[in-house]
Amino acid sequence: MSSGHAPTHLAFSDWLAQGRDTLPKGERTRRDLMIAGAELLASQPLVALTVAATCARTGVAHGTFYIHFSNRNALAGAVLQAFVDYLQDVMRAAAKGAPEPVRATTAAYMRLFADNAGLMRCLLTGGDALPAAQSAFQRLNHDWATTVANAARRRHGAAARAEPDLMRRALALGGMVDQYLTALHVTQDPALVALSQDPETLLDLFTDLWTKGMAP
C-alpha cells in the first residue's frame, strides 16, 4: 500500500548505486556487495542471507567478500545502517518546502515502508539475531523523534511542551505508527488490512495522531 501518490524518490538499491562508477575498484566491489545484500534482504528473512548467495548475485569470489566484510552479519549491519540513512534522506526531502510537512513526511514514510517491507522487517525484528539492526533502528527512532520534537518546539513556541515530554510523545507516536505498518505490510493482519484499503484515510489518521499528539 502507498500513500496514494507515485513515489518521487529513488529505490534503495538505486540510492546505494549512486556514484558507484566513480569509486575505486575495491570500493565498487564493497558497494556491489551491499546492493546485493539489500536486494536479498528485501525478499527474504535476515537468517536466510548467506555469503554464497551474495557472492553469486554480485559475481565475486568468497575470498573477495571477506576482504570487505567479516561475515554475513557485518554485511547486513552495513546495509541496514545505510537503509536508515536512506529513510532519513527521503523523509527530509519530502518535508522540505512542503506546505504541510507533517503530512508530507508521513506520506513518504508510508510509501517507504510499503515499498521496502522486507528491509523494514529486518530493521524492526532483527535485533535479537543482529545487534547492528537494533542499533540502526534505535538511531532511526531517536533521530526522527528529535526532528519531530524540534519541529513542534518551533511551531508552538513558548506554548510547546517541555523537552522530555516532546521526546516521549514523539517516540510513543513513532512506535504506534511502526506497529500499525508492521501489521499491515509485514505480518499482514487480515482485520487490519481490511480496515486499511484507503491510503488517504490512513494518511489522515497518522497525520492527525502526529499533529494532536505533539500539540501543547
Image (cartoon, rainbow, N blue to C red):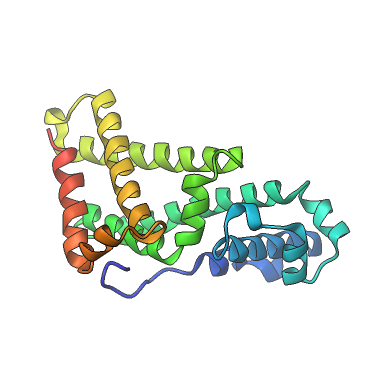
Q: Is residue 97 visible?
A: no
> In which quadrant of the rendered view does residue 34 lie?
bottom right
Place of residue 75 in the rendered image (x, y in percent of width and height, measured from the top left): 68, 52
Report whether 201 appears left or right of 121. left
Query: From the viewer's perspective, is residue 93 above or below residue 151?
Result: below
Can residue 145 be seen in this snapshot?
Answer: yes
Rendered location of residue 209, percent (x, y): 18, 46
Please report the residue visible at 72 percent of the width from the left and 51 percent of the height from the top: 72
Q: Nearer the viewer, residue 104 or 133?
A: 133
Q: Residue at x 54, y 63 (%)?
A: 42
Residue situated in front as seen by the camera: 126 or 170: 126
Q: Quadrant of the N terminus?
A: bottom left
Judged from this view, the residue extending furthest toward the bottom is 6
Q: Taking 56 as reference, is 100 left or right?
A: left
- What residue is rendered at 77% in x and 65% in y? 55
Where 164 sits versus 23, above or below? Answer: above
Question: Considering the image in quadrants, where does the C terminus appear?
Answer: top left
x and y percent of residue 196 in the render?
23, 63
